[in-house]
Amino acid sequence: MKKTFIILIIISFISLFFNLHKKNVSPPGFSADEAAFGYNAYSLLKTGRDEYGTFMPLRLKSFGDYKMPLYSYLSIPFIAFGGLNETTTRALNTFLSILFPFIIFALAKQLFKKDRYGVVAALLFSLTPAIQTIGRQAHEAYLTVFLICLSLWLFLKSLSIQQPIYKISFILSLFLLSYGYQFSRLWLMFFLFLTVFYTIKRKFSFKYLLTCLIFILFLFIPDIVIKPTRVGNLLFLNNIGLGLQTAELRNEGGRRFLYNKLTVGLKDSIYKYFTHYSPQFLVSQGDDNRRFNYPGISPITISEYLLIFIGLYYLFKDKQKFRHLLLICLIISPIASSLAWIDISVARSLPLIVFISIISAYGFIRIKNKLFLAVIVIIYSIFCFYSWDFYFNHYPKRAAAIRSWQYGNWRMVNFVKNNYDKCDRFYITKKNGQPYIFLLFYLNYSPEKYQKQAKLSPPDEFGFGQVERFDKFIFQFQFNPSAQKTVFIGYPDDFNQTLIDQNKIKKIKIGTEEIFWIYENP
């Protein structure tokens, strides 16, 4: 036990290293979603209310997407201690990167009853780019996957050890999980199914099942009351393109019962579902969101992809007690990502990567041929090295990554801060994201003051609203060179028709990439 604990400490430091190394360089920016989590935590700390003045909200209205609030609530101690900044906003996931190897070890050991499976699973998890690159962000998927693993471990412990502490802890973990990320609803239903199944097998009492059922149904009440538009708009049935596609198919002679939004949408969702298991998605390409992946960064290595099949083979060959449970976890992990009409996502299918690590660890341990093991390790090391080298040294220099990370907003806000007193108005483009949240975040704008001004426009087709203005800031690019004491901040293409002498324009750049152009009329 002492030796295992020391090894886990070392793995924990490895996990922490990949969370912190060159974090000021990669990712090459700080996203609007991260700023929203941080500012809402700051607002809750100062006033007990979110940015819109809602007291202790069960959802964060934010951009109209009604984010789950747990990340912000749990970030409050870090922001209280270190102030509102990028480091404290991301500190929660940094802290979890230390704990994660222990919970992966505990879960794998509970599944397979031997330490070595847990150690290998924890190590694979700590080195996996798909997991760690999301953990370097203030992203709620990382926190939610931690809670899924914790809940599953507590559930298994309550099966093997009939003590109330594990059952109570399991229910409490479900409570936290329900406020983690949107795909947590799917996992709540999964845990309810498990409880029903093991109640039928007389592992749990009917009273405990009823308690879990009532509690889980209670956790769905906020969804019924608030009705978050972002979640509904992401469902494949609400895709405008799907409606156009089905209309075209019917105009070409297709029967309505064969070509409608439900049948065509389900067909596309099934294709997307199976794409999650493809080597193209898991090994070579990942998803198309450049904040979560980029060609050159493999979500997992080719070795792990091979070990999935070896692990599944031995799980069933050895008749492992929880082999069906792990298979079900693999099956349900991509569902949330598949039902959304936008491209498949590493973040929304992140539980899949975790269970791949656990199953791969089992396959690795069960291989007895030392030469084959050596080849697996060598291939794994090479591909893992290249992924991390690309992420640390090349990814932050790519234009697509820079723009996806909304780089330059902190420098833009710094300009605003230095010129705030001498200007009456700031016209700021809203083309790329939500500029208002960066001003609130980097200015540490008073939550009490902002709550009196906060107003969000109705949601667009993607489920997002816009803040049109607050204080001196107007989030439209309405260029008027004769306006006095006014600053115009836009992207280079915003100035294309203005005929302004570029020598009068300040430029925010990274390398040769120009992000913001700023024209000041004193």
Image: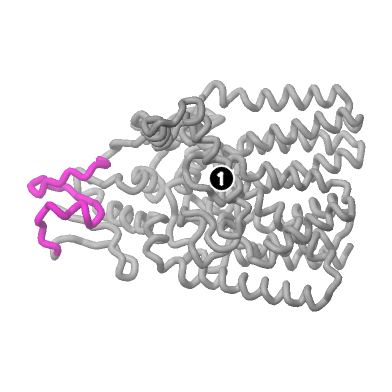
The answer to if 478 sits in the magenta stretch is: yes
Can the viewer see residue 479 in this picture?
yes
Q: Which residue is mark 1?
A: 271
Residue sitting at 47 percent across and 29 percent down?
A: 260
Q: Quadrant of residue 206?
A: top right
Per the rendered image, the range of residues in magenta is 473-502
Residue 462's x, y, as percent? 41, 37
Question: Which residue is situated farthest in the left direction here?
Answer: 482
Residue 66's x, y, as percent? 49, 33
Mark 1 residue element: helix
Looking at the image, residue 144 sits to the left or right of residue 156; the answer is: left
Can the viewer see residue 463 in this picture?
no
Q: Label 1 sits on what residue type?
A: Tyr
Looking at the image, residue 59 sits to the left or right of residue 125; the answer is: left
Looking at the image, residue 161 sits to the left or right of residue 96; the answer is: right
Q: Please say if 28 is above or below 478.
A: below
Looking at the image, residue 450 sits to the left or right of residue 121; the answer is: left
Which one is in front, 3 or 375?
A: 375
Residue sitting at 78 percent across and 58 percent down?
A: 311
**Dominant secondary structure, magenta:** loop
Residue sitting at 62 percent across and 70 percent down?
A: 384
Q: Quadrant of the N terminus?
A: bottom right
Which one is in front, 69 or 441?
A: 69
